[in-house]
Amino acid sequence: MTSDLRDLYQDVILDHGKKPRNSRVIEGATFTQPAFNPLCGDKGTLYLSMDPGGDKIVDAAYVGAGCSISTASASIMTDFVKGKTREEALATFGLFHDMITAPPDRASHRPVQDLGKLSVFSGVAEFPARVKCATLAWHALKAALTEAPGPAPTPVSTE
C-alpha cells in the first residue's frame, strides 16, 4: 500500500471516528443488538429497521463509545448496509472479515475492490489486535441478522 493511499485511508477513518454517521437510536427498530469488546471496553448498540417482509435493511444506526477504528467501522458499515438484503449484508460481513484477517502473504487476495469505502480498513490486517475493534459492529450485524426472527438467511461462504 502506498504512503498516499495509507494517508487517505487514515483520513477517512479519522473523519468517521470523529463525526460518525448514523449515530442515533432508531425508534421502533426491527432489531436492536448490543456489542461489547471486553479486551478494550468498546461498546455500542446496533439498530436495524427492516422492510415489512423482513429481508431488506431499510435503515441502520449505531450508538457507541469506542476507539476511532471501532467508531469509523460502525459508521461506514451503517451507510453501506442500507438497502441491502440479509443475504447481501451477511456476504459483505464475510468479505470484510476476510479482508481484515487475511495474513500478509494473502494481501493481494483481499477483496478490497468489492467493498468500496470499506476498503479503508484493509490495513487493519497488519495490526491483529485491532481486528476486534474493526469488527465489533459487524458482529452485532451478523448476530442481528442470523439470530433474530425473520426469513432464514442463506449460508454465506467467505472462500
Image (cartoon, rainbow, N blue to C red):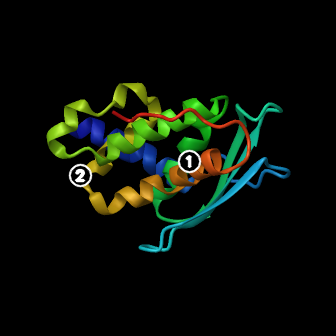
Q: Which mark is residue 142?
A: 1
Quadrant where the C terminus sits is top left
Can residue 1 be seen here?
A: no
Q: Quadrant of residue 63?
A: bottom right
Q: Earlier in the sequence, mark 2 or mark 1?
A: 2
Q: CA distance from mark 2 to mark 1?
A: 24 Å
Residue 21 position, x and y percent, is 63, 46
Q: Which mark is residue 18?
A: none
- From the image, state whether disc 2 or disc 1 is nearer to you: 1
For the residue pair 3 and 114, the one nearer the viewer reads as 114
- Identify the secondary structure beneath mark 1: helix
- Identify the secondary structure beneath mark 2: helix
Residue 24 position, x and y percent, is 73, 54
Residue corresponding to mark 2: 126
Query: Is 40 located above or below residue 46 in the figure?
Result: below
Can residue 15 be seen here?
A: yes
What residue appears at the point 22 percent right and 40 percent down from the top-left corner?
Answer: 3
What residue appears at the point 41 percent right and 73 percent down from the top-left corner?
Answer: 39
Query: Is 113 located above or below residue 125 in the figure?
Result: above
What residue appears at the point 49 percent right and 33 percent down from the top-left corner?
Answer: 91
Check disc 2 and give the amino acid type: Glu
Query: Is 70 located above or below residue 138 in the figure?
Result: below
Quadrant where the N terminus sits is top left
